[in-house]
Image (tube, rainbow, N blue to C red):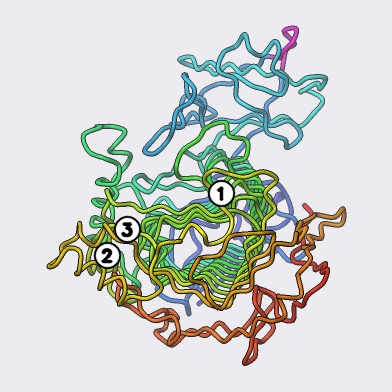
Amino acid sequence: MAREYHVAKNGCDKALGTAENPFLTISRAARVADEGDTVIVHEGVYREYVSPENGARSELHRITYTAAEGEHVVIKGSEIVSGWVSCGAYWRTVVSNTLFGAYNPYSEPIDGDWLVRPLDPPCHTGMVYLDGEPLMEAHALDTLNASVMYWYAEVLDEETVLYANFGDHDPNASLTEINVRRSCFCPEKTGRNYITVRGFEMAQAATPWSPPTADQVGLLGVHWSKGWIIEDNIIHDSRCCGISVGKEISTGHNQYTKTLAKAGGHYQFEAMFAGLRMGWSRETIGSHIIRNNLIYNCGQNGIVGHMGGAYSDIYGNEIHHVADRQEFFGYELGGIKLHAPIDTQIHHNHIHDCIMGTWLDWQAQGTRLYANVYHHNTIDIKIEVTHGPHLVDNNIFGSAQSFQNAAQGGAYVHNLFLGGMFKYEVLDRPTPYQLPHSTQVKGCTLVYGADDRYYNNIFASIQTEPNRRFVTGLGLYNGCPDNLQEYLDVVYKRFGKCDVESFAKEKQPLYTAHNFYTDGVAPYDRDHTAAVCDKPSDAVITVEEDGGVYLEMTLDASFDTLSATPVDTERLGIPRIAEERYENPDCTPVTVDCDLFGKARGEHPTVGPIEGLASGRVRILIAKCRKI
């Protein structure tokens, strides 16, 4: 029979775990909670690493970990440190290495595949916090004389010496904390399925760099499991990753960095096939729900996953200030960074002030990105080395650099692009594509670029100056044919009987209809149903003091002349390489019949993400920043 366990700061781990006699630690409850059980955690700060011992067989037997209703529960990967001694410009304290156990974050470098190393010595997974604010890591002790709000560490045989420049602050009179644990909540064993984690604040974990070819560790992680629900949490101040739904260590761990024998992409292929051999499928891995969380101040990514995030539903989250400090840099950064997010739905998220809003990489097949609001990111979205079908609809891309497209076979419908786009082919790196709605590999080939669909979008420009790479509008597709037959006719006429290389020498088609271009943005030269306006839209996205995020722009009268038509599975057709339909994960046809806010669209839908837009000056509340 299902049981209810309670945890409270006045409890005892030798107690029964009842409401009257609660456990003291969440870890104690996590050792005994089994199928159908609920762990209720009461108000307080819990400095521990929680590793659920058990999972469940099915949704019907789910194990739930939840904060008590109306109570603020914090799980921290840090410990308070005191005894700071002033050394002039900086302070010094000493902690015993027994505090860390086998994992000392101040001797663990941030290192691994696809990490670009601008600094030597490297950064470490440790951090120092003053009243909740993270300090930057210095790379030499003498730099602390001039570097305010920086820290430095020396790891000795039995102790770790910490130095920090706190400016005018006295660390002994403040809450001063240091990272100690690698994670806050993550099972040590894989296959702990059907767990719910609800209502917690989790912070300050010493997470390592998490590329797709390594053990992907998060402050909160599912560790190669199925069917988790992660909801209504506040996740922040992870050294690298916030929430991980990614791969585990047995399928490869930074082999490129260790051997330098093969390219990282080769090891990624090997990791994928290793995952298949150990059971990566819809029946065993993925299908997570990540909803209504606030995720911020993560050094690498807010949500990360290779393979393990497939078939998931990610929605209602606000993600901000991810990798924006740029203490270290690599090619695995983003508010959301997913590899192989097969059939994953990413929608109604608010993502801002990140180095990359969302990065979908390898095998984003069946992925749908819709009704999201992006603004003040370095780049809003990147889609890389995937062959389609993937659908991007009803989003606002509000940053100066909207879209980096290194993919093909995508459909972009009813979006607002306020920034530039950068498109390129990948003709030296074959990547796989799957059977419909499956993890099984159907084939593998190059990314020729294009074979994209752009219907009913608005293209404007908030760029303050021209960008040589990110160009506004669809003019970067000029020279592409507008239908498949023309492309094939050119290929076969020029090269006769063809092979892979011949197809790569001609531009693939681009399919367009009823797009609106303003601010003098260049259209695709064969976008014959478009409306083009040279007048300025004066588009801007502002964040008000109350947290309201507003879109303001002026639409020319020509906007009203567009008579768009609905977009659905039949109209989108089939991408040339994957030869699969754009459809829902349950194999039913997809219809783009609602706008950003869920309003139904009619027979002649409004162009852009907001139904009912009309010419003139508009000011619309598009999102709300959550207060912490």
The tag earlier along the polypeptide, 2 or 1, is: 2
Q: Which mark is residue 356?
A: 1
* Rendering coords of residue 439 (x, y %): 30, 68
CB within 8 Å, label 2 to label 1: no
Point 59% across, 73% down: residue: 515
For label 2, the residue is: 279
Q: Is residue 551 left or right of residue 217?
A: right
**Residue type, numbered disc 3:** Val
Which SS class for mark 3? strand
**Residue type, numbered disc 1:** Met
Mark 3 burial class by Cα count in 10 Å: few <14, some 14-19, many 20+: many
Q: Is residue 562 left or right of residue 302?
A: right
Distance of label 2 from label 3 (alpha carbons): 27 Å
Which SS class for mark 1? strand
CB within 8 Å, label 1 to label 3: no
For label 3, the residue is: 447
Looking at the rendered image, the disc whose residue lies closer to the viewer, 2 or 1, is 1
Q: Is residue 617 magenta?
A: no
* Rendering coords of residue 437 (x, y %): 35, 75
Where are the magenta residues, as a range?
Answer: 84-91
Looking at the rendered image, the disc whose residue lies closer to the viewer, 1 or 3, is 3
Q: Where is residue 587, by image quadrant?
A: bottom left
Distance of label 2 from label 1 (alpha carbons): 31 Å
